[in-house]
Image: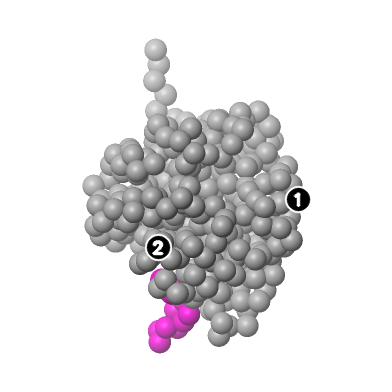
Amino acid sequence: MTVVTFAERFAELTEIRATRPDAIAEAAARRARRPSPLGPSGRMMIIAADHPARGALRAGPDALAMADRRDLLERLCVALDRPGVDGVLGTPDVIEDLLLLGALDGKVVLGSMNRGGLAGASFEIDDRFTAYSAAALAAAGLDGGKMLLRVDPGDPATARTLEACGNAVSGLAAHRLMAMVEPFLSARGNDGRLANVLTPEAMIRAIAIASGLGATSARTWLKVPVVPDMERVIAATTLPVVLLGGEVPADPDAALGGWQSALALPAVRGLVVGRSLLYPPGGDVAGAVDAAVRLL
């Protein structure tokens, strides 16, 4: 039996993109969908890969780790093939690459919506919706949309992002799709760079703001980091919560321990992790994913 290498699959992908653009819609139309985002355990494990569209290419010490698209896609395919991985979160370019590679059958597919707040930009807090819309997600047969909501009380541009996120929550609910909101309180430091405030009090306030977005919260989920005193943080909402992974940790075992403690809380329904699993210390993607899945 002939074994097709990933390099050959990638070459075919680039050929299809150049000569048969309609193949993307065809792949989306025939994708096998699953009835629920939750796995058999009632939990959800999602691999995140929406960082590049915001110009955030760093993973650990490598500032351009996510710049090589073939390498990123190969890592994603390895992760998605592991038992217990329920799906992926990405921007249209990444999702469409994975569709053409045949990696998304039976998976939960969440589209990233606002990527206009480019990392390090002066306008970063004004996080425009430059990727998926609710209507586009529904048309592509995807399962929901994710939005980043950073609230800087000192920056008037925050209001535009709040309004856009509220409209997106309402639009997704109208299409009966999940709205996954990733909220933070943020502030600019003395160096002018925007940073998220990761205290329990800041996360409680961010969760309260995010929970009230849109005309209904019936289909809203929250994506939050692990911070101190998670029991008090999660008590701020009745909405289902997933934990985000963030940057590649210096101590992977400590990160796993933090996720494990937070997953014991009833409202926490899973993990949405990207760079920590795709670019782990030592490079063993399958091993890193399996260790995270075991927590569920």
Residue depicted at 40% across the width and 39% down the height: 79
Residue at horizontal 31 percent and vertical 42 percent from the top? 291
In the depicted view, which residue is nearer to us: 75 or 144?
A: 144
Span shown in magenta: 187-198
For label 1, the SS is helix
Say if the magenta span includes residue 190: yes
What's the residue type where badge 1 is placed? Ala
Q: Are marks 2 and 1 in contact (CB under 8 Å)?
A: no
Q: Nearer the viewer, residue 197 or 130?
A: 197
Query: How many circles with numbers are drawn on the protein?
Result: 2
Report the residue marked by disc 1.
174
- Position of 25 with respect to 199 (left or right) is right
What residue is drawn where x is 56% and y is 57%?
A: 238
Residue 200, horizontal then vertical, whole percent: 42, 71
Which percent across, then down, holds residue 227? Answer: 38, 65
**Element type at marker 2?**
helix
- Expressed as whole percent of the image width and height from the top left, the position of residue 191 reads 40, 84
Q: Is residue 247 above or below residue 89?
A: below
Q: Which mark is residue 89?
A: none
Residue linked to disc 2 = 230
Please state which of residues 178 and 228 is positioned toward the viewer in this rendering. Answer: 228
Can you say whether 68 is above or below 200 in the image?
Answer: above
The answer to whether residue 190 is visible is yes
Q: Is residue 137 magenta?
A: no
The answer to whether residue 6 is left or right of residue 254 is right
What residue lies at 61% left-to-right and 28% top-to-bottom? Answer: 32
- Which quarter of the figure is the N terminus placed in? top left
Tell me: residue 51, above or below residue 117: above
